[in-house]
Amino acid sequence: MQKHHSRLGLLGSLALHSAIFASIWWAMHTTRPAKAVEEVTSISMEMMTAILEQPQVAVAPEPEPEEVKEPEPEETKEPEPEPEPIPDPKPIEPPKPIEKPKEKPKPKEKPKEKPKDKPKEKPKADKPKPPIKAVEKGAEVKQGIVAKAIPDAVQGTKLQTAVSGSGNSNSASSSGEINAYKARLQRTLQQRANNAYPQREKMMRKTGIVTLGFTLSSSGQITNVSVVKSSGNSNLDEAASRAAQSTKMNSPPPAGFPTYLTVPVKFSLQ
């Protein structure tokens, strides 16, 4: 309704203005007396002022047509899947008892037979020993005299015991002498080797053990010296051999002393 009135007002004002301009133009181009022209001019001026004094109807701007929003299509919700029915739980079967393996019957042990007692041997009767013949002495044998068996047998035993006892004491004394002589020989040989220690090997702190083999004469002289086991240093081996060759014991070896010996000689810085 408001739009309709505004359009009518606009058309009316245009028609009025057109009429005024047309009348002015017509007045200017027609020949009239000056008075008439003045009247027309005054009338036209009065009309112009009247028109200008009239309040002009403000023409409201046409509102922009509102955009019609298309209704958005509603999202179609998918129907929720119906929950599957939960199957009834199966009844839990109780565990079957584990069957123990049947034990095989053990074979019955046969009763052990008791060993039969051996018949005890009867003690043999001691045979009568023949009478021991008496030890015949040189003078009595010549004369053909035989002494009684028992006293002479005891006497022979005593004589045999005395002889064997004296032999044991002699062997013990000889073994002791042999061991003592061996120890003395080794000490003497070691002292000679210490004196023959090469100076160069000492400075280089070379050490080692040389095993020597040699023959000992009846006078106590060492001969036929050889290196049985080397020390790993040829200079030490030669020094030990020279020391042994120049060694002679002060006394001869005891009876039963071995003629060939092996003795270790040690070279150390201690």
Image: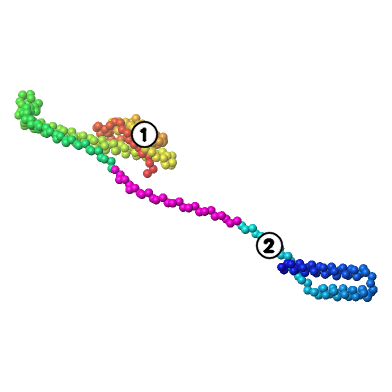
Residue 91 among magenta residues: yes
Label 1 vs 2, first from the N-terminus:
2
Measure the C-alpha gap from mark 1 to mark 2: 127 Å
Q: Is residue 246 visible?
A: no
Regarding mark 2 in the picture, which secondary structure is present there? loop
User: Residue at position x 26%, y 40% from top?
Assistant: 102
Q: Is residue 9 visible?
A: yes
Q: Tell me residue 160's x, y (percent).
A: 13, 32
Q: Nearer the viewer, residue 166 or 5?
A: 5
Question: Where 74 sits versus 40, above or below?
Answer: above
Numbered tag placed on residue 66 in the rendering: 2
* Amino acid type at image mark 2: Glu
User: Residue at position x 46%, y 52% from top?
Assistant: 83
Residue 158 among magenta residues: no
Q: Nearer the viewer, residue 8 or 210?
A: 8
User: Residue at position x 39%, y 50% from top?
Assistant: 89
Question: What residue sits right under mark 1 in the picture?
Answer: 229
Q: Identify the magenta region.
A: 73-99
User: Residue at position x 92%, y 74% from top?
Assistant: 36
Is the magenta region chiefly helix, strand or loop?
A: loop
In this rendering, would 234 be left or right of 145? right
Is the N terminus in the top left, top right, bottom left or bottom right quadrant? Answer: bottom right
Question: Where 17 sits versus 249, above or below?
Answer: below
Regarding mark 1 in the picture, which secondary structure is present there? strand
Give neighbour class at mark 1: few <14, some 14-19, many 20+ (Cα, 10 Å): some
* Amino acid type at image mark 1: Lys
Numbered tag placed on residue 18 in the rendering: none
Q: Nearer the viewer, residue 164 or 137?
A: 164
Q: Tell me residue 43's x, y (percent).
A: 87, 75
Q: Quadrant of residue 268?
A: top left
Q: Quadrant of residue 38?
A: bottom right
Q: Tell me residue 162's x, y (percent).
A: 14, 34
